[in-house]
């Protein structure tokens, strides 16, 4: 492997974990309903609550939540401010992250309007939205493009503040469960959570033993734990990959100690077994993962059965190629929120790249090579959309995959975004690449590393755009891979 390719892989493949981590670290904001008594408890709570954010016992950031009534003379209701700051160490460089949510609620605590901002090196976003019934309409501004969309939830959204006394009234016995719809302003997606009560648990926090109520929250296969005191306040919350939130006084929470340990080491998936031979065209991997995770492990070049993925390296170009295939093609020709395949800048560039070429294999190679050579390999912590990537000309694997998908769809080639893991040195890391439909079969390519087809270590767990990619977060801390010697 050349030094240049090794550097590209180090920067772009491993850093594809980061946007996923941020979506997990970001607290879940919106839930279904509260009783009148619970509203009164919230109204009497102190205005400000602080939480320290820890990674491997080092304080790397904090969360502030401020809840208070709207100003006198306004329509009865409440205003909420939530802020988070973090310092993350990535490739031994500190990456500052800032997030802020401002929201107005009605007197029943239903969300009315919100403003959300996010900033990191090389990326900013601002989202504003309003709620009508159970529909959230929003505008996302990345500084390079503006996206408008509407999401329908199962119920009008509410804010789950750090006071969650409603869980203590609705989940009384260990094993009791509650299904809650919510909206996440960072990913701008709607999901459902399942809250499960596990009873009392004694936790040693500092030098004091706390007898707390233990809950888990599951959504999209991901699971987080949190602990409430008898007043319903969150005292501790633990996310995948080892992030921990602890209720603290302000002077402690805002005193960020450092950026913590190297972030990527916390999410790498060590493998067992022996590496495949460099000439191998098949490979077999034993996968251990959460039982309830919905995946796309089976299909295309992957066959999944009894916990084993069998991979077969594709023939590229495929035999008897004469036209684009129909592998459920309609869904993968359409533009989407983050894959703006119908934008004039995207379609014009795609036509410029392919020129007069009409043969599909040549078109794909031209598009992939252009993305590989023209997008600077940089860690971009944010929502990856094709148009912003095109205008910024930088990104990691998520940005590469989104831009290639938009360009290919723009010239009529059905293209999906595949998310899963791939190998770098001695571990597997989260990664995103593309699958294209040719001659009625899915074929892989990775424009981040310029591989057509992608090597056998690209194990796909999901196929789709951002909404589907979120479920891969359930793998954090819950994935084991064994390379089988008889592959």
Image (cartoon, grey):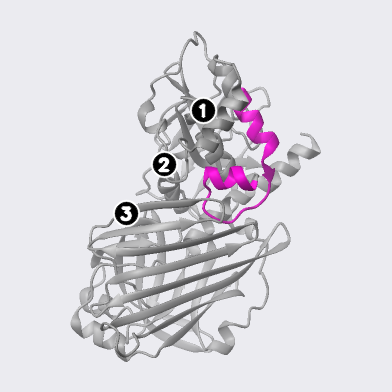
Which portion, as a residue range, is magenta?
365-392
Q: Does the magenta stretch include residue 375?
A: yes
- Tell me if residue 316 comes above or below residue 185 in the rendering: above
In the image, 318: left or right of 234?
right
Task: Please tell me whether the stretch drawn in magenta is mainly helix, strand or loop.
Answer: helix
Residue 298 colored in magenta in the image: no
Image side of residue 161 versus residue 365, left or right: left
Residue at figure coordinates x 59%, y 16% from the top left: 356
Residue of label 3: 151
Q: What element carries label 1?
A: strand
Quadrant assignment, res 348: top right
**Quadrant where the N terminus lies?**
top right
Element type at mark 3: strand
Q: Residue 336 carries which label?
A: 2
Q: Which one is earlier in the sequence, the residue at label 3 or at label 2?
A: 3
Q: Mark 1 points at which residue?
A: 311
Q: Distance between the residues labelled 3 and 2?
A: 13 Å
Q: Nearer the viewer, residue 267 or 13?
A: 13
The Cα–Cα distance between marks 1 and 3, rounded to whole angstroms, is 37 Å
Pointer 3 with pointer 2, Cβ within 8 A = no
**Vertical placement of residue 43 versus 88, above or below:** below
Q: Is residue 481 visible?
A: no
Which quadrant: the C terminus? top right
């Amino acid at each position: 492997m050349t030094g240049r390719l090794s550097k590209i892989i180090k920067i772009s493949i491993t850093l594809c974990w980061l946007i996923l981590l941020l979506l997990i670290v970001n607290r879940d904001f919106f839930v279904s309903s509260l009783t009148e008594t619970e509203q009164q408890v919230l109204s009497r709570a102190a205005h400000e609550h602080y939480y320290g954010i820890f990674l491997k016992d080092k304080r790397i950031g904090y969360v502030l939540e401020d809840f208070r009534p709207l100003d006198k003379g306004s329509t009865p209701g409440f205003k909420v401010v939530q802020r988070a700051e973090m310092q993350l160490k990535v490739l031994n460089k500190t990456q500052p992250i800032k997030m802020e949510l401002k929201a107005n609620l009605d007197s029943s605590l239903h969300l009315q309007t919100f403003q959300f901002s996010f900033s990191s090196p090389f990326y900013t976003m601002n989202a504003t939205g309003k709620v009508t019934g159970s529909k959230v309409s929003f505008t996302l501004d990345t500084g390079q493009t503006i996206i408008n969309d509407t999401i329908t939830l199962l119920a009008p959204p509410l804010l789950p503040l750090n006071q969650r006394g409603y869980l203590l009234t609705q989940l009384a016995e260990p094993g009791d469960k509650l299904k809650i719809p919510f909206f996440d302003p960072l990913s701008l997606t709607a999901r459902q959570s399942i809250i499960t009560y596990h009873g009392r648990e004694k936790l040693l926090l500092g030098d004091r033993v706390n007898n707390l109520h233990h809950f888990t929250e599951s959504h999209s296969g991901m699971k987080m734990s949190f602990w409430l005191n008898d007043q319903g306040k969150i005292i501790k919350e633990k996310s995948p990959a080892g992030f921990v939130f602890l209720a603290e006084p302000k002077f402690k929470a805002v005193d960020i100690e450092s950026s913590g340990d190297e972030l990527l080491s916390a999410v790498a998936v060590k493998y067992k077994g022996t590496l495949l031979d460099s000439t191998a065209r098949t490979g077999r991997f034993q996968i251990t993962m959460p039982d309830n995770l919905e995946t796309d492990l089976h299909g295309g070049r992957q066959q999944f059965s009894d916990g084993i993925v069998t991979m077969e390296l594709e023939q590229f170009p495929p035999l008897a190629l004469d036209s684009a295939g129909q592998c459920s093609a309609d869904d993968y020709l359409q533009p989407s929120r983050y894959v703006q395949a119908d934008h004039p800048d995207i379609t014009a560039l795609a036509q410029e790249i392919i020129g007069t070429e009409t043969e599909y294999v040549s078109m794909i190679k031209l598009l992939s090579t252009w993305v590989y050579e023209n997008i600077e390999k940089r860690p971009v912590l944010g929502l990856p959309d094709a148009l912003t990537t095109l205008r910024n000309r930088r990104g990691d694997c998520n940005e590469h995959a989104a831009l290639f998908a938009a360009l290919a769809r723009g010239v009529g080639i059905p293209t999906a975004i595949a998310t899963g893991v791939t190998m770098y040195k001695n571990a597997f890391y989260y990664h995103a690449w593309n699958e294209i439909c040719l001659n009625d079969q899915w074929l892989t390519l990775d424009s981040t590393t310029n591989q057509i087809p992608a090597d056998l270590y690209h194990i796909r767990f999901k196929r789709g755009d951002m909404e589907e990619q979120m479920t891969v977060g359930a793998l954090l801390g819950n994935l084991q891979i064994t390379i089988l010697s008889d592959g």
